[in-house]
Amino acid sequence: MGNPGQRQKVVPMITNKCLHLCSVCSLCIIFLGFGGLAQEKPAVLAGEYLGMKTPERRPLLFAPAVVSTGYHEHSAPTFSPDGKEIYWSVFKDVNQPQLIMCMKSVDGVWTLPMTAPFSGEYSDGGPFISPDGRRLFFYSNRPVRQNGVTKRDFDLWFVERRGEEWSDPIRLGFTVNSRWDESSPSVSKTGTLYFHSDRPGGFGNYDIYSSRMSAGQYLEPRNLGAAVNSSGHESYPYVAPDQRYLIFTGGERGDNFGLGDLFISIRDTNGVLSRARNVGRVVNDEFDNRFPLVSHDGKFLFFVSNRSYRNADDPDANRGPGNGFGDIYWVSAEIIHELRD
């Protein structure tokens, strides 16, 4: 559940680079997904959140056949602070790397999904745009030389905003990254970094860590302790911009409904995180629910689930969203505010 490279078999797809002059997504014909597979026909995508109907207290599939497809979506979507760019990651095929995808709003209309300009060669995932929009963090297995040896585990990287473009990827360095996996970054508005890792010394298989920034450099990461971590699996953290709460995926904790549930930990007035509790049945079920992320405006909670609603006897059951590979859902963030208050 916590492995950043975890995936299921999906159908190959074709991608292009997402440039700032992408063609506009005026979809008046059958949408051919990423790999030419006919899926449900969306309308022209315009307005906030790609023009999708916003959810209330019941989770809805996000952008079916556009963002949530027949492939394996492997992160929640992260939006730029102005809401005009969206990034997420997806597995295109078991034999190909995970990709970070993007769309942009041009004159109010959204472009087609395409590969982010800094992704495509290596396995990249878990994109997260910082609250100020200046950096996009992600994890990657791109090779790094350490002590004369090339290491290919998952490390944390970022790109910096330079005008309308992103910089080349920059590795966070050996203070944060280790010879074990670091994955799923989330950053507060003061720059404090949260992530999960399977490095030794934790409580379970994967634990959640944080690293404060000082003088422009990240300090030695610290384990968040027994209030958050357990002998099970803790992964895919999301921290609120003001760090008032942390949402993450927990497995094998004793109070799970499914393989992976969303949990929340609230920070008190002394800055101490409370013992994590299950978010509840509004989101969690018998399936695997991962990658929590609250939208840039604080209105919606996004997450990824492998819940399936297609008939297994249908020959086209695997050709669209809801096939159990992993789709993106969203729900009103009011459920988080109620747990927090």
Image (cartoon, helix red, strand yellow):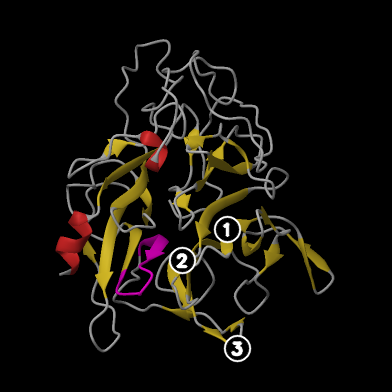
Residue at image location 44% in from the left, 73% down from the top: 189
What residue is pinned by disc 2? 131
Select label 2 or label 3 by which is in front.
Answer: 2
**Residue nearer the viewer, 138 or 41:** 41
Q: Is residue 142 left or right of residue 3?
A: right
Crowd rating for badge 3 (residues with CA inside 10 Å; few <14, some 14–19, many 20+): few
Select label 2 or label 1 by which is in front.
Answer: 2
Q: For numbered disc 2, what is the local secondary structure? A: loop
Residue 278 vertical position relative to residue 286 in the rendered view, above or below: below
The image quadrant of residue 199 is: bottom right
Select label 3 or label 1 by which is in front.
Answer: 3
What residue is pinned by disc 3? 215
Residue 87 coordinates in the image, percent (x, y): 52, 47
Q: Distance between the residues labelled 3 and 1?
A: 22 Å
Residue 257: image tag? none
Crowd rating for badge 1 (residues with CA inside 10 Å; few <14, some 14–19, many 20+): many
Which callout, 3 or 1, points at the residue further toward the start of the chain?
1
Residue 18 vertical position relative to residue 207 in the rendered view, above or below: above
Residue type, numbered disc 3:
Ala
Magenta-drawn segment: 232-245
| Image quadrant occupied by the C terminus | bottom left
Q: Is residue 33 left or right of residue 57?
A: right
Residue type, numbered disc 1:
Phe
What residue is pinned by disc 1? 138
Viewer can see residue 279: no
CB under 8 Å between callouts 2 and 3?
no
Q: How far apart are marks 2 and 1 (CA)?
A: 14 Å
